[in-house]
Amino acid sequence: MGRTAEHVYVEPGDIARIQRLVVELPSQAHVRITMQGGAIISGTVAERPAAQLFEDASGAAGMNAQLRIDDPVAPSCTTYVWLGDIKRVERLIAH
């Protein structure tokens, strides 16, 4: 497989949550994301993420997805986050 993630998800409820987040994150959406640890990331979704099969460090296979968020004020500032680490997504109105 060759693709690794820190956390992978195999429980149906966790996979459904990741799939719901994919729907909430369309390309070019302006969002504010709250991470599980409380960090807040705001920016533009570069491209809708895709749930995929990954392996964790122990070799267990499961689902996750990676999201790229671009900062519209500083285009060279890009943040990548795992959907499994997201607590909440808020859509913002573009100005």
Image (cartoon, rainbow, N blue to C red):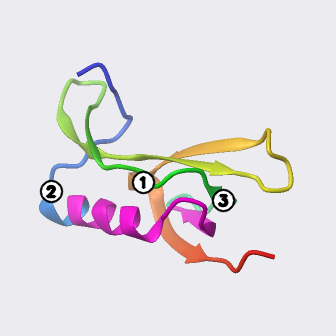
Number of the label disc, if any, that sits on residue 83? 1
Range of the magenta residues? Answer: 15-35
Q: Could you give the CA–CA distance between mark 2 and mark 3, rounded to whole angstroms?
A: 29 Å
Q: Position of residue 23 (x, y in %)?
A: 38, 68
Residue position for label 3: 44
Q: Choose mark 2 or mark 1, whichever is in front.
A: 1
Residue position for label 2: 11
Asked if residue 13 is among those painted magenta in the image, a careful observer would answer no
Q: Position of residue 72 (x, y in %)?
A: 79, 56
Q: Choose mark 2 or mark 3, whichever is in front.
A: 3
Pick the quarter of the image with the C terminus. Answer: bottom right
**Relative to 38, does residue 50 appear above or below in the rendering?**
above
Asked if residue 16 is among those painted magenta in the image, a careful observer would answer yes
Q: Residue furthest top?
A: 2
Q: Identify which residue, 46 or 31, lies in the foreground.
A: 46
The kind of residue on which mark 2 rests is: Glu
